[in-house]
Image (cartoon, rainbow, N blue to C red):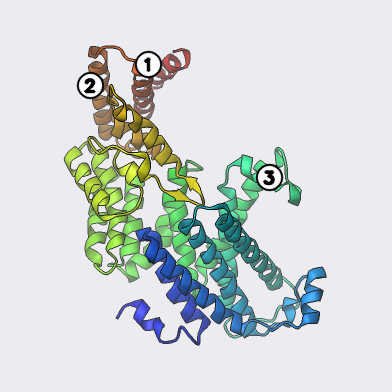
């Protein structure tokens, strides 16, 4: 019996059952990007929020007026009511995420932002409650505190990953100019601390804290280029779960990510293939493995296998078809572009811009489209740990450079030459040939 069936019978009477059921549907919607799945998840999460509302403290007209002036006195809440608050905040946050996925217009964006603001306000007040002298721990306080740590940590960690120019807009809380950098650092440290504490607790949300940390250390920091992450910490967090659930698909996936980041590509391939075989209920989860396998075989220059998984994704999945069609002969078109919160994905913009060369009346092929896209996804940091793989990619770049020199010059020749020089320089840097790498980067600078 799947988890959905286990919790479905109490979704109308239990806030935790309703929240769990809606959260699973939201995870499915996030993986499929299907509009109907997103709508169903949104409706279910709205129903879960209504269930949570039933358990929240009822406010009188006088209370409502008082709250306009003073912060709601959470010290007077019963244990059930504070659990309702944390579940309500979680519903708000997840509904906001679905709103951003579902609609692209400004009204929906504003509605989602209001949900996030209200959710953050509740988390902040509950965090203050835990640290107040009036806080009395109830029988299930560990689950409540775990939820607060997850929410506060996730908010701070998200803020720490925003570009400085956006954080500088937070002048209304007293941060501006160079202080924005300090804010980012403090949010990152506080966010990680809260989530790590949540992961170490034996609470309902411990596994969610653990998965968020695993995602941060093995994916977000790596792909976004905001840090090196902490592979050792990720492995430490993953080990007890992988021991307890050796066939757990999500844990096998993160195990594959750890192997890939370490440069053990064969080990990563083995883990991702094992992950695909671990379960068949969520076919969309296989697509995450297909994406990783596509890049693993790209690192090994096994182009047909890489193409095989890219083609599978293009046919089966509704994720970014733009990025998947950067492989030879499957070119992006503007009509495939996705938007989240009304904004196009940067990697899609990049791929679409590159694909325009193939839609012109006189198409000019890209010299190394796959290797260039590999740079966008920080793949050279992976092969940089494997001299043999780096040498292989460097050989491919040398061949591409020689082929480019033989072709008649075009308006794109300088751009193409500089792209190859850049990628060669990166490979040389990872091979320890610093002087040669600098020569390539200097050539680009003065070109």
Q: Quadrant of the C terminus?
A: top left
Residue 325 image offset from top left, x and y in percent: 29, 41
Q: Nearer the viewer, residue 144 or 93?
A: 93
Label 3, on which residue?
Answer: 169
Above/below status of 319 relative to 390:
below
Q: Which residue is mark 1?
A: 414
Contact check, label 3 and label 1, Cβ < 8 Å: no
Residue 229 shows in the view: no
Residue appearing at x 28%, y 37% in the figure: 331
Mark 2 falls on what kind of element?
helix
Distance from disc 2 to disc 1, alpha carbons, whole Å, reads 17 Å
Q: Nearer the viewer, residue 92 or 80?
A: 92
In the picture of the structure, the residue carrying the numbered disc 2 is 399
Image height of 205 relative to 163, above or below: below
- Above or below, comparing residue 95 to residue 361 in the picture: below
Q: Position of residue 194 (x, y in %)?
A: 58, 62
> Looking at the image, which residue sits at the far left?
304
Q: Mark 2 or 3, which is nearer the eye?
A: 3
Give the mark nearer the N terminus: 2 vs 3: 3
- Horizontal placement of 51 versus 415: left or right? right
| Element carrying mark 3 | loop
426 or 259, nearer to the observer: 426
- Which quadrant of the figure has residue 370? top left
Mark 3, Cα crowd under 10 Å, few <14 / some 14-19 / many 20+, is: few
Q: Is residue 101 left or right of residue 4?
A: right
Do labels 2 and 3 touch, CB within 8 Å? no
Image location (x, y in percent) of residue 199: 50, 66
């Amino acid at each position: 019996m799947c988890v959905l069936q286990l919790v479905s019978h109490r979704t109308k009477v239990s806030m935790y059952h309703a929240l769990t059921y809606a959260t699973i549907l939201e995870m499915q919607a996030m993986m499929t990007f299907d509009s109907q799945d997103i709508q169903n998840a949104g409706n279910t999460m709205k129903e879960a929020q209504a269930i949570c509302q039933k358990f929240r403290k009822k406010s009188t007209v006088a209370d409502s007026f008082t709250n306009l002036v003073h912060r709601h006195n959470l010290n007077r809440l019963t244990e059930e009511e504070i659990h309702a608050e944390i579940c309500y905040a979680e519903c708000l946050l997840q509904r906001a995420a679905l709103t951003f996925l579902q609609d692209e217009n400004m009204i929906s964006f504003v509605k989602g932002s209001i949900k996030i603001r209200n959710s953050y306000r509740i988390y902040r007040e509950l965090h203050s409650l835990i640290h107040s002298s009036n806080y009395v721990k109830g029988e299930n306080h560990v689950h409540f505190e775990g939820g607060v740590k997850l929410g506060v940590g996730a908010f701070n960690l998200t803020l720490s990953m925003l570009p400085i120019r956006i954080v500088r807009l937070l002048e209304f809380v007293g941060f501006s100019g160079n202080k924005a950098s300090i804010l980012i650092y403090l949010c990152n440290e506080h966010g990680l601390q809260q989530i790590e504490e949540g992961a170490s607790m034996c609470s309902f949300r411990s596994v969610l804290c653990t998965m968020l940390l695993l995602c941060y250390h093995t994916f977000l920091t790596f792909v976004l280029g905001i840090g090196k992450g902490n592979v050792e910490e990720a492995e430490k967090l993953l080990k007890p779960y992988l021991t307890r659930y050796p066939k757990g698909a999500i844990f096998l996936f993160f195990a594959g990510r750890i192997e890939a980041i370490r440069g053990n590509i064969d080990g990563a391939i083995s883990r991702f293939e094992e992950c695909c075989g671990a379960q068949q209920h969520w076919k969309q989860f296989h697509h995450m493995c297909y994406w990783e396998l596509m890049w693993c075989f790209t690192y090994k220059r096994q182009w047909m296998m890489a193409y095989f998984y890219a083609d599978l994704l293009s046919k089966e999945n509704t994720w970014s078809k733009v990025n998947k069609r950067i492989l030879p002969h499957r070119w992006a078109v503007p009509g495939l572009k996705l938007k989240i919160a009304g904004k196009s994905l940067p990697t899609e913009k990049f791929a679409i811009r590159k694909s325009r060369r193939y839609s012109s009346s006189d198409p000019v092929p890209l010299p190394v489209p796959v290797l260039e896209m590999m740079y966008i996804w920080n793949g050279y940091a992976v092969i940089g740990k494997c001299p043999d793989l780096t040498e292989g990619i460097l050989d491919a770049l040398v061949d591409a450079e020689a082929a480019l020199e033989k072709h008649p010059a075009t308006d794109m020749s300088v751009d193409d030459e500089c792209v190859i020089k850049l990628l060669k320089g990166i490979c040389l840097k990872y091979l320890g040939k610093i002087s040669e790498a600098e020569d390539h980067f200097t050539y680009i600078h003065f070109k």
